[in-house]
Amino acid sequence: MASVSMTVNGTAVTASIDPRTLLVQYLRETLRLTGTHVGCDTSQCGACVVHVDGKAVKSCTILAMSCDGAAVTTIEGLAHGTELHPMQAAFREHHGLQCGFCTPGMIMTAVDLVNRKGGALDEHIVREELEGNICRCTGYHNIVKAVQAGAEAMAGAGQPIAAE
Amino acid sequence: MTATGIGAPVRRKEDFRFITGQGRYTDDINQPGQTYAVFVRSPHAHAAIKSIDATAAKASPGVLAVLTGDDLAADKVGGLICGWMIHNKDGSPMRAGGHPALAQGKVRYVGDHVAVVIAETYAQARDAAEMVVVDYTVLPAVVDMVKATQKGAATVHDVAPDNVVYDWHLGDKASTDAAFARAKHVTKLDIVNNRLVPNPMEPRAAIGDYDGGTEAFTLYTTSQNPHVARLVLSAFIGIAPEHKLRVIAPDVGGGFGSKIFIYAEETVCVWAAKKVGRPVKWVSDRTEAFLCDAHGRDHLTHAELAVDDKGKILAMRVKTKANLGAYLSTFASSVPTYLYAPLLSGQYDIPAIYCEVEGVYTTTAPVDAYRGAGRPEATFVVERLVEVAARQLGQDPAAFRKKNFIRKFPHQTPVIMAYDTGDYSASLEKALDMADYKNFGKRKRDSARAGKLRGIGFSAYIEACGIAPSQAVGSLGAGVGLWESAEVRVNPVGTVEVLTGSHSHGQGHETTFAQLVSDRLGIPIDQVAIVHGDTDKVQFGMGTYGSRSGAVGMSAISKALDKVVAKAKKVAAYALEASDGDIEFKDGRFSVAGTDRSLAFGEVALQAYIAHKFSGQDLEPGLKEGAFYDPTNFTFPSGVHICELEVDPETGTIRIDRWTAVDDFGNIINPMIVEGQVHGGIAQGVGQALFEGAHYDKDGQLVTASYMDYCMPRADDLPSFAVGTTVTPCPSNPLGIKGCGEAGAIAAPPAVINAITDALGHEDVTMPATPQEVWRAVQKAQRVLAAE
């Protein structure tokens, strides 16, 4: 076992873990933050995307030990109480989710996208940037609309913009 | 229409928990004292098990048990079942081999379940699973379904020495052959309907738990139909009696059919929980999902269409071989038979149809219902045949379809179905308009100038949904009835809980069903809760598949609401001191006709519970009503999808330029949710047409067992979709609903392939039309042109 310390959604946490523990396992099983999902074994589906030091990371592809000292934000850390992050609100308003399983990863990826590329995103850019997130329900049509609307709302809110 | 009533695009009530990471899927649940199961799976497609040595695994840290098929047999746990009996042409029953949850003597596909290791942690279970030594005698794989039934092929199940599960037919052979004999023109096609892996984003999972004090089991599972799971685990597999088994399907991350079935893993988790005396959790990884979730499609078909000299279709003749895999999954036998051949009439008036289907065992994963289930396969046959016939006759494909559309309803097809209503021309006309068909030629010329080949493809589909009248499906071999149940519980303060046997795993029932209740009772939507997915709460239900939750599930709710209103009127009559017959109910108020005396719905609910205004001998207190609804017919959603795309002849890549969908789903409760269903269905249909294909090598190894190898449609593979509707209300249920869940997946594949073949000028394109396949087809097109 090994000790690891990081900040998760603004709270400092320290735990003793098996060194082979993936970040997603640490978040889900040790911290019981189950909003981050595991949809594949090959870093393809993006259901596990969280932010590590402000950047989108597939948490199934990084050891928890590698995040020692890092600031991690998960889907649970995006809203302020019942006040939704603009990207969360846009997903609901534009019906950008059905079963909801890919949704946390989609939203975390979308927030990172806006942080990198700004709020004016054309459909082509959004579709290319979502290449690492698979959704089986929506056909992406409404996800793309949600991301564009969420990006505009984030830009309008004048944030740099993530919860971090 | 109110802001939250029928027809309003109400934003979903369930979304808040999903967008904030508070969904509760099976893998999010942990039980105190929980252990972890990892399955030892067959690395061979076909092998006899000589011995299993678990000594090292049992001694590995944290291991509680290693269980095998011998242990299942010793406990007299029954095998998995196939719940639909199909009869051969000669009337004899299909030949179904045994399907033990853990292999007994033999494995029949890569991933087949050999043993289960149960340990304190997941990592310990996985480590120990590697230490289980299985001594196999490898047998010849049976991969190719054509070779499977030829002499010399190995036998998968002794009960079917030639690997034929059934040899079934439907329709009138003599009249069909006679029509072909007099036909002026016959179109013939050989069709591959490629094998798919459903791939809901949430992998399957199960937690089995046993309470020794009450001798009761609980199963948390990723199921589309928890009551059917309980019924099968109890009545057939025999793990526990129904009243001692609670099945909970909490939030479920998509299903698309693959979570209808009762699989080995959940069976083993329930059984093993009692054996080890601790809760047992199993979560599939994605490779296991590829190997062991029931696959979809996988047909080989020869199809023929007979047409007279005026372009009128006379008859259709179809011969299909269907790969059913290594075992018959829960509803596998019905998919290529009664869910397939009865749809071969499509939207067309076809006087004679004859279809033969041979179901075949192979040493591959079981094949069962996947979004559309038989209907996409039928629609692909019909819409490819019709398209090619139009081209061969030199007729406009839209006009040829229109000429052959059914126009009078009800319409009895020659293959069981009695279509109740529809207006196929209306959908076609609207789609042509939305797709700007009249300017397609100009766009094609523009593409040609840019070095691209532009094509347009139509698909005029029909499906049979809402499955279906229990008597009807019973007469066709179904082992269950296909009604739905609902219970409406009105609380004393007037809030309402609806318990439904339907299950939502992305469809938005918590919103749509609440809209119906809000509309009918005149109460705000946030005062309605939809309860589903727990056999201890909902008395019984048949679950969600076949686009049935609206047409059947909501009809059951509607029927229960009628009873609630009828009872509430009686309560109101006492409270308002009037006679029942004078009570009117409108916009949430009960009033005495012709007076200003009235009570709100909530006030009447309170009166029902305090029961001060009437004698309990005259009227029972309380306000709670239930209903079982059995439909009078299938429903028949239909529509026209048009795909317009560009082929790059240099690379074989395809860009879908525009997608037009016009669907007739009957009445619609929530258009936003319905459009979402259409989008998702189209994406899966385009996936089948362009990207997806499960591929086994000659030894029966699945070489497409991850997202690195199996091409899922991604955001940058797809366009946005133009979606419209026409409406002919369904006369077969009280709400006029037809269903929308599978339409896109049914409509899309032939639209795409018709568009590609239109662009290339020949018909030799096989799904999935990957760039490699399209490039090959482009080369062939160029040879054809050169030869001309």
Image (cartoon, coloured by chain):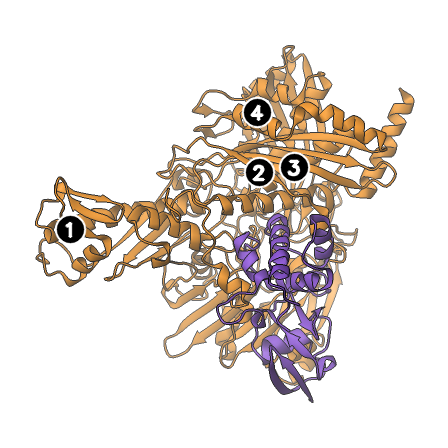
Chain colours: A purple, B orange
Can you say whether B437 is above or below A160 in the image? Answer: above
Element carrying mark 3: strand
Tell me the number on the disc at residue B429: 4
Q: From mark 1 to mark 4, how far is it between C-alphas? A: 50 Å
Q: Counting residues from the N terminus, which is met first, the one under dot 3 or under dot 4?
A: 4
Q: Is residue B176 visible?
A: no
Number of other residues with Cα within 10 Å of mark 1, as a class: few under 14, some 14 to 19, many 20 or more: many
Tell me where residue A106 appears, x and y as whole percent: 64, 60
Q: CA distance from mark 3 to mark 1?
A: 53 Å
> Residue flagged by tag 4: what amino acid is it?
Glu
* Contact between labelled residues 2 and 4, with CB atoms less than 8 Å apart: no
Element at label 1:
helix
Position of B614 with respect to A70 (left or right) is left
Q: Which mark sits nearer the N-terminus, 3 or 2? A: 3
**Picture coordinates of residue B613 (x, y %)?**
9, 57
Residue bearing mark 3: B659
Give the chain of mark 4.
B
Q: CA distance from mark 3 to mark 2?
A: 8 Å
Looking at the image, residue B416 lies above or below residue B555: above
Image position of B501 (left or right of B76): left
Q: Which residue is mark 2?
A: B723
Task: Identify the mark nearer the N-term, 1 or 4.
Answer: 4
Task: From the viewer's side, name the closer residue of B436 and B674.
Answer: B436
Give, as a three-letter code, the residue at label 3: Trp
The residue shown at (46%, 61%) is: B233
Residue B449 circle label: none
Q: Disc 2 sits on a residue from what chain?
A: B
Contact? badges 1 and 4 (CB < 8 Å): no
